[in-house]
Image: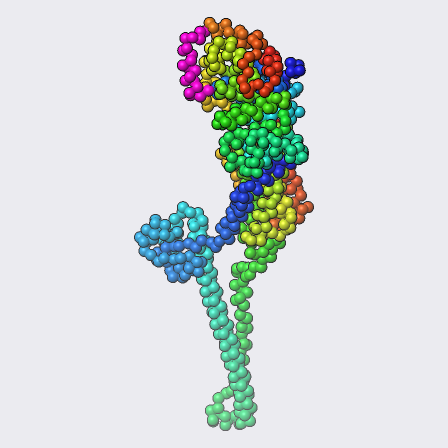
Amino acid sequence: MRNTLALTRRILQQFSHDPRTIVLFVVGPILVLWLFSVLLNSPAYQPVIATVDLPEPLVMALQDEDATCLQTTSDQAAELLASGEVDAVLSLDGTTLVVLVEGANPSRTSSVMQAVQSATKNLALDEREQIEADIQKRSDEVKGNLTEMRTQFEEFSKQLSELQGFMTKMRELSSQLPSDMLDTLGFPEIPDTVQNPDIPEFPEMPDFDSIITEFSPTVSDVQIDYLHGSSDWGNFDFFGPVFIGIFIFMFVFLTSGMSLVTERTGGTMERLLVTPIKPWQLVLGFCLGFGVVTLVQASIVLWASITLIGFPNEGSLLVVVTVTFSMALVSLNLGLLVSALARTPFQIIQFMLILVIPQVLLSGIFDLTAAPSVLQILSNCFPITYGAAALRDIMLRGAGFSEVALNLGILWVFIVVFFVLASLSFARRKAH
Amino acid sequence: MLAAEPLAELSGVYKRFSKQEVLSLIDLKLFSGQITGLLGPSGAGKTTIVNIIVGSYLPTAGTVRVLGETPPFKNARKQLGFMPQSEALYLDLTANQNLRFFGSLYGMSKSRLDQKIPEVLNLVRLGDEGRKLVADFSGGMKRRLSLAIALLHDPALLVLDEPTIGLDPKHRLELWRGFRERAASDAGLLITTHVMDEAAFCDRLLMVQDGRIIADDSPEKLIQTTNTQTLEEAFLAFENQSPNLNQKADQGPPGEKTAAGFSAVENHEYNADKTDPGFSAAENQNQSGDATDPGVSPFENQNQLRESASPGASREGGQDA
């Protein structure tokens, strides 16, 4: 054990003599993570669009979508598009809206499409509102007319009753007069009664509001509640935990990978392998030495990421540090294994491209549910996947030790496997 | 005494890297109290022999026994001091930290390190430099520190690969004084060199060419048996009468491929010497029998440095080889 600890102490002494590396070791990941947070939190791109003879409402709708609209002739528009000053040209062909996009930059294309779609949708909504308003207005008019007719009819009916009363009175009066007098006077014969016509049943006006709602059962309002997180969480928050793990993994891989190559190029490996130290003691010594450094690094980087940069953390910092540190140990042992195989620092970089970058790509940055099954299987073979999943569970969903125990356990299996492989490759190297 | 048990013994050792034969039929024995030199041009196979003795390489064929063990070595490593040809120091540590680290790997306790570190630093004339970063050391200081590391744990067998390379004559002599002191305290030393004047300081010299030992005797006897004036001439004499030479002149172990000869200047001298009419092939043939049959001539002409070693040791070593 003494020689293992001697190696550990030596690594710490070397770090203490090398403040630049210490600073880079801590500042590097923090800088990258900060940059990452700024990029993912920055507002969306606002497209610049040239419009050729578009109706004013459409242009206004586009402007409402934060698109910058330049009203131009078609020739000017073509020029602007070619020179890259606008992202798209909009014109009308009959009733079809023609969108010509620059097309090289998919994110700009999609922001143009988003603006156009939102604007046309809003226009359609406006039109619909107009129609609805018309219907409402006419229905109100009809209602008013009907009411008036009913009133007039009632008035008429009342007057008719009055007339009937008057006629009844007249009949009574005329009956009291002698009939020949009536003839002489030429008094007209009074009809018996005036038939009081029935007031027709006026239909009740239907309620137009309910008709409109019935035709288009749109959801008028949406309320969103969050099981985890809040409406403030964006892409950055989703990717953040994964990236913390990834960056620490990469930094540790480079450091441990380079360490043994440096021993080899500096000739000290030649001397080390002649000493009585056993291969596993050598690897363990490196693990302990770099482990201490990595633990300090991971703690500082995590603290800065959460408190200074604003990475979300729903769980306990202790659990986060444990998972991150375990990922770092996987990386450390993988680095030592690779270091035992590589001969030059350049080969370490190449090994990183082969062994680390695919892990990063398949670690959960991209949703793999629809990806070829080979990639899904590969993803399950990579340690970063488990670390990233655990970090997400803790930092986004507030998981504790028990909930991430499986992922943590798998990470430790990787640690042991890589440790044994690194020790074996040293043993092979020790005498050949 | 010494005749009983050699510190290290190689018999019939072959070493091959892929299909390239680097060593063929190496037989050698190293004894305590004796400085054995491995003399030969770059690429001759000296470092490969050294690497087999310290356990870094396994022989393709033949037997190796070092400090009573066959490879892979376990306890033997503790008794082995090794100074590789390269610097092999941590430049970002102080001299003391380098010594303490390697000493701990040999299982030395803190108190023993506290006692031994100043001792070995004084021995290599770095007594006041222990707290300095090795990065600030001159080339000579680094070589001397490297030697101090090899000496630190009082190894029974010291294997030094080109220990004086790149050193000025003053430091070179100082180091040789140190080697002599170790031999006097009964350690066995194996030192590789391609410098002739240094080879003369050894008790016994193994001349290596193209992966073979072409001569094995004390420097004086090598000169005497070849009837030459210098070790260079003696080396050439053995080289000329040895079979298969010059055919494989460019071959050597991977680490030594860069130079095929001693050095440009030295090669030039040898080529000039080869045309020396005073040194005939017939003479070589006659003398080769004597040279490879050690112990015939009496031990003579000890130089000043060799005086301090036990003469008996070197004589018996020569006889055993």
Relative to A147, B69 lies left or right: right
Q: Is there any visible trace of residue A248 in the rendered image? A: yes
Q: Is residue B258 left or right of residue B10?
A: left
Residue positioned 53% across, 72% down in the render? A202
Furthest residue in direction left, as rendered: A75
Nearer-the-camera pick, B74 or A130? B74
Measuring from the top left, give residue B123's x and y in whole percent. Answer: 58, 29
Q: Using the image as rendered, state which of residue A247 and residue A171 is in the foreground.
A: A247
Total marks placed: 0
Residue at image position (48%, 7%) is: B284
Question: Which residues lie in the magenta part?
Answer: B262-281
Q: Which residue is nearer to you in this view: B176 or B189?
A: B176
Name the residue at the right extreme: A402
- Work out whether residue B159 can be spotted: no
Magenta: main secondary structure equals helix
Does residue A214 sit above or below B34 in this rendering? below
Q: What colouring does the structure picture have?
A: rainbow
Q: What percent of the width, then of the height, locates residue A81?
A: 35, 50
Q: Residue at x 62, y 42 (%)?
A: A292
Q: Is residue A205 above or below residue B2?
A: below
Q: Give coordinates of residue A160: x percent, y percent.
A: 52, 83
- Residue B276 part of the magenta segment: yes
| B228 magenta-colored | no
Quarter containing the C terminus of chain B? top right
Q: Quadrant of the N terminus of chain B?
A: top right
x and y percentages locating residue A44 in the rendered image:
47, 54
